[in-house]
Image (tube, rainbow, N blue to C red):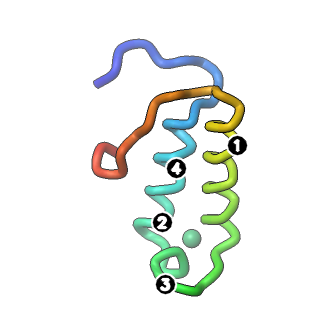
Amino acid sequence: MTAARPTAPCAEEAWCAAILHAAGCLACRTSGAVCERGEALLAAYAEAVQQGRSSFWCPPWNC
Ligand SMILES: [Zn+2]
């Protein structure tokens, strides 16, 4: 468990949200398929990283 968490949205949470969605979404797991929800989650994660809101990389196996 991590100690203090930032109050602002961070890349870690965005990444975990994207991974958790993809894990249970058939469309995301299908090669060539397009999932709007998955794309939005990944975009949110990429945006969080680009804005430097978090340098923390959360491996999928830790989510
Ligand atoms: Zn999906």
**Residue at numbered disc 1:** 47
Question: Which of the marked residues, 2 or 3, is nearer the chain's N terminus?
Answer: 2
| Disc 4/disc 1 C-alpha distance (Å) | 14 Å
Q: What residue type is disc 2 on? A: Ala
- The local secondary structure at tag 1 comes to helix
Q: Are marks 2 and 1 in contact (CB under 8 Å)?
A: no
Residue topped by disc 2:
22
Mark 2 vs ligand 1: CB below 8 Å: yes
Q: Give the mark nearest the N terminus, 3 or 4.
A: 4
Ligand 1 is in which quadrant of the figure? bottom right
The amino acid pointed to by label 4 is Ala
Q: Earlier in the sequence, mark 2 or mark 1?
A: 2
- Residue labelled with disc 4: 17
Residue at 63% of width from left, 55% of height from top?
A: 41
At label 2, counting other C-alpha atoms closer than 10 Å, the crowd grade (few under 14, some 14-19, many 20 or more) is many
Instruction: Assign a secondary structure to mark 2.
Output: helix
Which residue is rendered at x = 35% and y = 45% of the image? 59
Horizontal and vertical percent position of residue 40: 69, 59
In space, the residues marked 2 and 1 are separated at their CA atoms by 18 Å
Ligand 1 lies under 8 Å from the Cβ of mark 1? no
Q: Position of residue 37 (x, y in %)?
A: 66, 65
Left or right for 47, reference 16: right
In percent of width and height, residue 52 lies at 65, 28
Horizontally, is 63 left or right of 56 in the view?
Answer: left
Q: CA distance from mark 2 to mark 3?
A: 10 Å
Q: CA distance from mark 2 to mark 4?
A: 9 Å
